[in-house]
Image: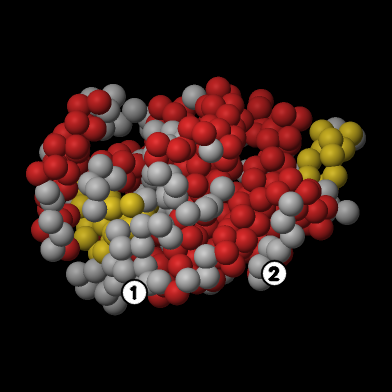
Amino acid sequence: MTRIAKVGEDCLFAGSREEMCAEAARRTGLEDFGKPDFHEGLDRLLDELDSANLSPQGAIAARESILGHLTGRLRSIDGFKRHAEAMLRPVVRPLIVTGIVRSGTTALHKLLSMDPQFQGAEHWLCAAPQPRPPRSAWSDNPDFRNSKSILDGMIAQAPEFLEDHGMAVDTVEESLNLLAQRFCTNMFPSQFVIPRYDFWYRMQDDTPSYRHFADNLRLIGANDPDRRWLLKNPTDTLSLHEVLAVFPDAMVVQTHRDPLQSIPSVVNLISAAHRMFCGENADAARVYAREEEFWELALRRADEVKAKHPGQVFDVQFADFVRDQIGFVHRIYDHFGLELSAQAEVAMRGWLAANPRRSTTMQRFTPEDFGGSSDALKERYAAYRGRYGY
């Protein structure tokens, strides 16, 4: 039996993979999890959570999070079977936003989603994958209401998610939430201090995860198969090789920001999740050490892949986006031969007016705020900072 969390000598609750899967099946009335390729990642995650310094409340939240991914997987596999014809449709030339966290990826994703030529995976549909119903029916959908309740509770505990990540139940969400169904994902080492799982994850071939993800896109878009997909996931920088293996004609936009600014901002955001799960046991210095190292690896891997796919990834600077968001969008559309309609531009300008940039400064935090060193960070990222002019 694998314990999920322990405080002192008291085990809060226990659960093996088999028991967690059984609980997910009970909640959904479904039994088919599809391929067993998620077993190893889930086993490794459960094994290590026992030593992740979770608080009692955080342990319960972690358990519910894991069950959420399992129930989502059950819903997906059931949907794949119910909508087999949709599984045969290609995902054609998606537009993918990636780049180091806190380099404008979320704002750019939300802004581009105002263009009706794109469809994205809304937050509630990542939790309960199904063919997207008409928006007018969402408020009466029990899955929508359940996702809203869960998200409201999370934001109440960690309001930084709402402020810094723009999370809302009815807007587009990043791909990480659907990729987590295979339990081989950067989501978990970002939320918990689990170095053994983290090491294992970085050594994996993510291609099966992205194939499963593509099937989820086909399912969610089953009622709208001809509309182009808009996707966003900063961790795609680590797995760009696998992304292009599954979406070979993808149009990729990679945002860039000086790591001296972005890494401390990443740590500030992710520390909110650690506080939610660990309470007073949250260790910002360990979060900083992990994120500083991880993103250097991700950016280095991305540059290696981009060298083999000239022109397929459009590199843009966060500072340019801050100065002129609409001009930034025009550059992206021009590069990939997309048409920005007058209707879409009006909608984008409306979104910008309703969501002004809150900070007027490019840097709110420093490495030293989290026990790091600006000089050490500059040294680690010397090649990247030189390549992109920082």
Q: Earlier in the sequence, mark 2 or mark 1?
A: 2
Position of 58 with respect to 232 (left or right) is right
Position of 356 with respect to 334 (left or right) is right
Q: Quote the CA–CA distance across marks 2 and 1.
A: 26 Å
Badge 1 crowding class, 10 Å Cα cut-off, few under 14, some 14 to 19, many 20 or more, is some
Above or below, 60 relative to 335: above
Viewer-closest of 376 and 31: 31
Residue carrying label 2 = 36
Q: Residue at x 31, y 69 (%)?
A: 92
What percent of the width, then of the height, locates residue 331?
12, 53
In the picture, residue 11 is in which quadrant? top right
Which amino acid type is marked by label 1?
Answer: Pro
Q: Is residue 49 visible?
A: no
Q: Residue at x 48, y 60 (%)?
A: 219
Residue carrying label 1 = 248
Position of 196 with respect to 227 (left or right) is right
User: Which quarter of the figure is the N terminus placed in?
Assistant: bottom right
Which amino acid type is marked by label 2?
Answer: Pro
